[in-house]
Image (tube, rainbow, N blue to C red):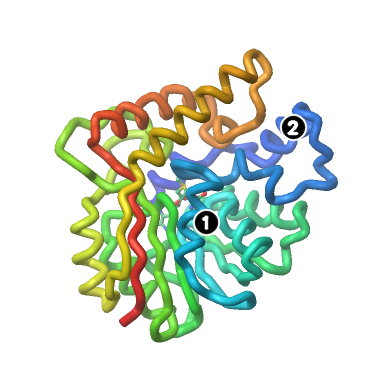
């Protein structure tokens, strides 16, 4: 099976929209009156959740009405947040057909259907004309992509001159064995993690200049400790969260990922660059 099919099979759930809506109903939410904030514990599929999206977005200086590309948009948490709170118009692309459908459905349900749109596509072949976007961002996607050089060249192509490109990916921090599964890998066949220095080199080769870089390991560890404290406080009635998206192996995926973070093998890292 080729890599992209293995990646989308890893993420495919089968009945994700109904699983999310049933969990919200069981938690007492009126699914006819959902806001992007109600969905945030479930639809921000990266380390640090909504806070990490806000922190990345704070470094993207674009006005309301700007057009941005979300690469690997998942079920749409970051795009709905940016559309609602920053007034940006967002196009998301993702490999996983079910995620594209769920992203559209949740955006309709939260009244954001006109501000965001999603398509099934690969980050290595973007279905947009040259110089379409003012900015682009990618959260926890590069770890699934062997040919980042192709992605960065495509992003450069669809960005207007001086367009911003913000990345927040898990990157390799030191040598060390991987344990599987984690939230974004079922096994080694979809593990294409790279170091921050490899990202910087490939971005430079694609015509980007690096503006900022920030290692977010301490933030990530604190964010998990906070979640553990909240889960303990919720006891036997946990609130709906990312476990719905990750499925029955969620506890194992999270434990393996925590181990990699604690051992310093991976670190979530931001890199902000501009199209030179
Ligand atoms: C961990 S999820 C992150 C989703 C979203 N960015 C978020 O933070 O909520 C990774 C996403 O990347 C997508 N993905 C992986 N490789 C891709 C590729 N080559 N092209 C487009 N999407 C890809 C997956 O389908 C999945 O939705």
Q: Is residue 98 left or right of residue 24?
A: left
Give the numbered dot on residue 257.
none
Position of residue 53 measured from the top left corner of the image (x, y, whole percent): 51, 53
Residue occupying the point 31% across, 27% down: 259
Front residue of 92/196: it is 196
Provide the residue designation for mark 2.
Answer: 22
Q: How far is the residue under mark 2 from the one under mark 1?
A: 23 Å
Instruction: Point out the tag, 2 or 1, that comes first from the N-terminus.
Output: 2
Compared to residue 133, the image places residue 230 above or below, namely: above
Q: Quadrant of the N terminus?
A: top left
For label 1, being within 8 Å of ligand 1 is answered yes
Count of number-bearing discs: 2
Position of residue 34 measured from the top left corner of the image (x, y, whole percent): 78, 47
Compared to residue 94, the image places residue 185 above or below, namely: above
Numbered disc 2: secondary structure? helix
Residue occupying the point 62% across, 71% down: 89
Compared to residue 119, the image places residue 195 above or below, namely: above
Position of residue 38 measured from the top left corner of the image (x, y, whole percent): 71, 43
Provide the residue designation for mark 1.
Answer: 73
Residue occupying the point 59% across, 32% down: 244
Q: Residues within 10 Å of mark 2 (few under 14, many from 20)?
A: some
Front residue of 269/104: it is 269
Position of residue 158 measured from the top left corner of the image (x, y, whole percent): 43, 79
Residue occupying the point 38% across, 60% down: 167
Front residue of 177/99: it is 177
Q: Is residue 44 at all visible to an observer of this figure? A: yes
Q: Residues within 10 Å of mark 1 (few under 14, many from 20)?
A: many
Disc 2 vs disc 1: Cβ atoms closer than 8 Å? no
Numbered disc 1: secondary structure? loop
Q: Quadrant of the C terminus?
A: bottom left
């Amino acid at each position: 099976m080729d890599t992209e099919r293995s990646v989308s099979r890893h993420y495919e759930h089968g009945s994700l929209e109904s699983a999310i809506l049933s969990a919200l109903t069981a938690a007492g939410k009126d699914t006819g009156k959902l806001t992007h904030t109600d969905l945030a514990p479930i639809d921000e599929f990266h380390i640090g959740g909504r806070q990490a999206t806000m922190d990345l977005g704070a470094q993207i200086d674009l006005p309301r009405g700007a057009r941005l590309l979300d690469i690997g948009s998942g079920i749409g948490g970051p795009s709905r947040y940016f559309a609602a709170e920053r007034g940006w118009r967002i196009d998301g692309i993702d490999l996983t057909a079910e995620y594209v459908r769920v992203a559209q459905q949740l955006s309709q349900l939260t009244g954001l259907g006109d501000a965001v749109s999603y398509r099934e596509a690969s980050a290595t072949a973007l279905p947009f004309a040259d110089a379409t976007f003012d900015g682009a961002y990618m959260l926890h996607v590069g770890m699934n992509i062997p040919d980042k050089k192709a992605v960065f060249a495509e992003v450069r192509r669809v960005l207007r001159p001086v367009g911003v490109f913000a990345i927040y990916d898990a990157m390799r921090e030191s040598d060390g064995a991987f344990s599987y599964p984690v939230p974004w890998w079922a096994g080694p066949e979809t593990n294409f993690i790279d170091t921050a220095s490899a990202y910087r080199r490939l971005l430079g080769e694609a015509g980007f200049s690096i503006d900022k870089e920030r290692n977010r390991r301490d933030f990530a560890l604190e964010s998990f400790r906070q979640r553990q404290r909240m889960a303990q406080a919720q006891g036997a009635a946990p609130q709906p969260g990312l476990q719905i998206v990750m499925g029955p192996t969620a506890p194992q995926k999270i434990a393996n990922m925590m181990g990699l973070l604690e051992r310093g093998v991976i670190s979530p890292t931001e890199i902000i660059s501009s199209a030179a």
